[in-house]
Amino acid sequence: MTQTQPPAPDDLHAQALAVLRSLTGRPDAAFHPGQFEAIEALVARRERALVVQRTGWGKSAVYFIAALLQRRRGSGPALIVSPLLALMRDQVAAAERAGVRAAAINSANVTEWRAIEQHLADDDVDVLFVSPERLVNPRFRAEQLPALVERCGLLVIDEAHCISDWGHDFRPDYRRIRDLIAALPASVPVLATTATANERVVADVAEQMAVGGHEVFTLRGALARASLRLGVLALGTPARRLAWLAEHLDTLPGSGIVYCLTVSAAEDAAALLAQAGHRVLPYTGRTDAAERAAAEDALKRNEVKALIATSALGMGFDKGDLGFVVHVGAPSSPVAYYQQVGRAGRATPNADVLLLPGVEDQEIWHWFATNAMPTQARADAVLGALAAADRPLSVAALEARVEIRRGPLELLLKVLAVDGAVESVQGGWVGTGQPWSYDAERYARVADARVAEQQAMLAYERLGTPAGDPVCRMQFLTAQLDDPHAAPCGRCDVCAGPWYPTEITVPVLERAQATLDHVGVPIAPRTLWPSGLDTLGVLVDGAPLKGKLAAADQVEEGRVVARLTDLGWGGRLRDLFAVDADGRPVDAEVPPELGQAVLRVLAGWEWAQRPVAVAWVPSLGRPRLVESLATGIASAGRLELLGPLELSPGAEPLRGSTNSAYRVRDVWGRFVVGPAMAERVAALSGPILLVDDLVDSRWTITVAGRLLRRAGADSVMPLALASVG
């Protein structure tokens, strides 16, 4: 397809303005400052442009207009790399409303791929949205990407801060875009857009865009949002924060989002607010995909007051009249916080943003940070396993060969793939044989940056208090983004005083405390052995252990008092499972308050048959805790006390949480039901309560329970103080 020469600048402005008015349906529409300059750089000069502008400025209008103008000049479709499925849905719908022929290829619409491929072949697509993960997919790389690169009229990288591992939402697959840019013809313009990037991230993204020696045109605007009214209300306990929400949620304008730091916290908050009569829905990583889409639609139609969400509801959601964003617990970075609050007030003159910080926030930040970046040992283990394999390894097969959980393993594979050390092929992953070295200095800099971001977030919380600086909240946030236009807003609670109610009535607080005091979280039994156990030497009578657990070997559904991430009992349980300065578990008897909670769990457990005896999992780290828990239950329930299973000679303390195959390896053969206990178990008629302190992978209680079942137990019912997830 032959391209015509770019138009003269005056003609380009007239053409671009006409497209803008057609897209918006408004004959009086005009460009925001900087919009036409970006379009001109792309269409007239075919440059590489990085646009850093506040949410709602109109970055999508820039790439839609540039794409259409390029199409009119004979170019192929624009390729837009977009990070989230929800964002793609909104963008495709917006494009189609504006008369732009748009399509998306992602994991959620596999059944539509063939039709989309035909539309591309027929040149019936103006813009194609793809997720960054598609750039790793072998079929997409082989069948679609070469033709798209050859015909591409414009490459757009949306939410470009994800390219940078300095950014607040590091996505390794985004770093493949550097290779994609390098493969483009020099005449193809490239646009990267973001609303949240400081100078360090801007420099990192621009460096990757400049591959091939190209100049990068950077357009930065003021990032402050005139519609947002910011505030921080320190209430302390989870009960007080949720009571405030229950009492005042309906006073917030319109409909909005309540963000929580963990899935458990979001589910707890959603349940409490629903019980208080508020129209809310949970939205987390555990929410089914169809339910997520339905929840988004319900919020957009104002059928609910709020979605109670984790960061799973992030960049992909666009509702112009969102009236408020409340955080129950603070994100670990002012940049991440500004990204989330930017959902509010995009097309309304006013929106309220309130942070209710929690005392548990820093613990949660630390947990997420320790799982975010690769380590030398983990990378070496993955590369070694792939090198030793004679075929591609799926993630499940690789998981059985390295001691890494599924989530961190998938992230590490992406990092190694971006660096060229591994490659995704049909059937799994292979090593490329290219040399790879761990960039310890780089990851140390990133870790230091994370700590600085956390300290900045704490400083934001203290603004306007005796312990903090008298600085405007909006000024502080935009200064964290290195915005040269950062200035006092005149609206936040530092500039104008608190705008939110602070009172909590006693009955509402008591109801919140009672709800959070609920105990008894079900623990589903394991029913399938993890794959790859034979490679770890886990065998039964010389045969591989695989497939479904025999019904006669399975335990029943169990219970824990609460999850460590729960808003209610989570804090007290985290304190109980703390370690000392040397990293050793702190062992003590079960506190009386927690003992009473355990008895409430037992009283509320709707079992088919009451247990008749108690046994416990022996612990090297917290023996007093587990023994006091088991003996206390037996005494209170007048149950036969069987004692602990025996530990195999030479047993050592179990390491930290790991993947399923390695956990089974570590606990297989660790426990023994001795002859005396076996004789007593065989004589019982009824369930045995199997007590442990902490449930993580569920494989300890599965393996220990299997031994009791094989000794003759009718059934085994696990009970522990807490679960990790």
Image (cartoon, helix red, strand yellow):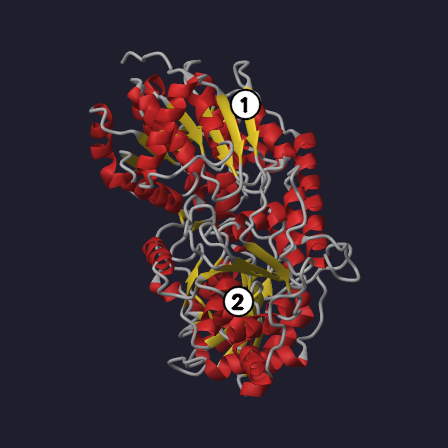
Please give the name of the residue rendered at 60% of the width and 53% of the height, measured from the top-left corner. Answer: 331
Q: Nearer the viewer, residue 380 or 184?
A: 184
Q: Is residue 250 left or right of residue 154?
A: right
Name of the residue lying farthest toward the front? 28
Q: Is residue 58 left or right of residue 439?
A: left
Please give the name of the residue rendered at 67% of the width and 52% of the height, measured from the top-left corner. Answer: 457
Quarter of the rendering containing residue 468: bottom right
- Residue 483 in view here: yes
Q: Nearer the viewer, residue 423 or 268?
A: 268
Residue linked to disc 1:
217
Residue linked to disc 2:
673
Please give the name of the residue rendered at 50% of the width and 25% of the height, measured from the top-left corner. Answer: 49
- x, y percentage for residue 567? 57, 68
Q: SS class of the residue under badge 2?
A: loop
Mark 2 or 1: the one toward you: 1
- Residue 645 in view here: no
- x, y percentage for residue 582? 77, 54
Amino acid type, label 2? Val
Q: Nearer the viewer, residue 221 or 481?
A: 221
Quarter of the rendering containing residue 670: bottom right
Above or below for 13 versus 698: above
Q: Nearer the viewer, residue 51 or 336?
A: 51
Quarter of the rendering containing residue 641: bottom right
Q: Which quadrant of the figure contains the N terminus?
A: top left
Above or below for 3 versus 357: above
Q: Is residue 179 left or right of residue 594?
A: left
Query: How many neighbours does mark 1 have within 10 angstroms: few (below 14), some (14-19), or many (20 or more)?
Result: some
Separation (CA) of disc 2 from disc 1: 71 Å
Please give the name of the residue rendered at 37% of the width and 39% of the height, measured from the top-left corner. Answer: 28
- x, y percentage for residue 450? 66, 43
